Image (cartoon, helix red, strand yellow):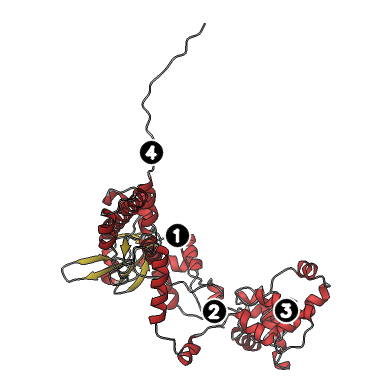
Amino acid sequence: MGMTKLILAPQQKQQLNLHLVQQMKLLQLGALELEQYVREAVEANPLLEFPGEAEGPAWQETAQEVYRRKRTRDQEDEPLPDPVANAGRQEKTLQQVVEEQLGCLRLSGVDRSLACYMAGTLDSRGWWTESVEETARAFGVTEDRVLQVLQQIQQLEPAGIGARDLSQCLLLQLENQGKEADLTRRIIREGLDLLARNQIPALARKFGCTQKEILAAKARICVLDPKPGARFAGAGPVVYQREDARVEDTGEGLKVTVYDTWGRKFVLNQEYLDWAGEQGNGQVKAYLKEQLGKARQLQQLLKERQQTLLVVFQALVSHQEPFFRLGPGHRQPLKLADLAEETGLAVSTVSRALQHKVIGCRWGSFTAGSFLQGQASSHEQGAVTEERLQQLIRELIEGEDKHHPLSDQAICRALEQQGVQVARRTVNKYRVKMGIGDKSARKEW
């Protein structure tokens, strides 16, 4: 009969307690998210308050009743907005603009519902790219009827909305122009690919006209709007950003200030604390004790977050000192591992500290992650960052003869003359990344 063996062996396990989980969550929050988090925590905890915001509550009221009363009082104290001044600040979405115009059209009930559906499904460019077949099936109508309603949408302002593709969007904007735009229409229908590559001689041969006529048509196309819906406000809320830290040159060195991004300091409500000590009700006392623990834990978590951000930002500023003194174009190669090694923190912790953070300085506001720079090439005096290489390429292209633009290989040779060793494919990579066309696309005829 076999015997069961018991073997004891040491084993390492990493366990995350609740405090560490909350610590990591707070660390990666941005300024606005953190402010909202703290405000919700203060509102949910009767032992916390912002100084000057609350009066001592009546003990018979619950925390929810106190909060509701405070909110009502705050709203009553707020001055009414000026309707005249407010009207100028209102922004309409593309859907609202289209629906207002639909109200002036004589449409049947089904057609109006269909038109409103189309207005609500226009994409950010103002195009309608939904399936005609599926739309017809959903509304119980024929595909021809869907296209008829779409044609009515396409006659509304701004010109070009409701288009199915780029060519149709541009052609819709030329509908009110006469025969002088015939060549322009032909180019849009049959030669947009050649025009995108700036192949002016090829277009002249294709359409049997002079290069001057092609250039005139190109100028006409360039003033059209390929995204007529982009000028309108988005349907969602406006996204704001707020600085988490600021770097200032004091003359003696660079000073890093990490803001208390939750706004006002919250404090413990002393009246509640005194009342809790006099309580004989066990359940009430246990509840207030639990809330006191949460309040002190929140204070500790915010303090730890502040300290971690300060350590990480100081290390980042130390590495990127040339940028903060001299401005854009002077970022230095920097990796997460470099910051982790200098601060003694884990790479994941440093990554969370930089997520959703904005650092302000005399040159503007920048996301913390933008200071992580890879090495793009080598230089006689050291490494060249991606930002610096892009700046050098842009300067060469801006200074070139537009009638004889530089090829990627010519840009490589020009950079070598400046002591920067870089491959042609690297120049091509960063030129495309900056949205700059190739040699033929930049040529002026």
Quickly name the residue at label 1.
Answer: 423
Task: Report the side of 284 relative to 201 (left or right).
Answer: left
Residue depicted at 70% across the width and 92% down the height? 177
- How far apart are the alpha carbons under marks 2 and 3? 20 Å
> Quick one: 47 or 333, which is closer to the camera?
47
How many residues crowd around disc 3 within 10 Å: few (fewer than 14), some, or many (20 or more)?
Answer: many
How many residues crowd around disc 2 within 10 Å: few (fewer than 14), some, or many (20 or more)?
Answer: some
Quickly name the residue at label 2.
Answer: 233
Marks counted in the figure total 4
N-terminal of the pair, mark 1 or mark 2, is 2
Residue 399, position in %: x, y? 42, 78
- How far apart are the alpha carbons under marks 1 and 4? 45 Å
Residue depicted at 40% across the width and 65% down the height? 36
How many residues crowd around disc 4 within 10 Å: few (fewer than 14), some, or many (20 or more)?
Answer: few
Quickly name the residue at label 4.
Answer: 14
Image quadrant in which you'd find residue 103 = bottom right
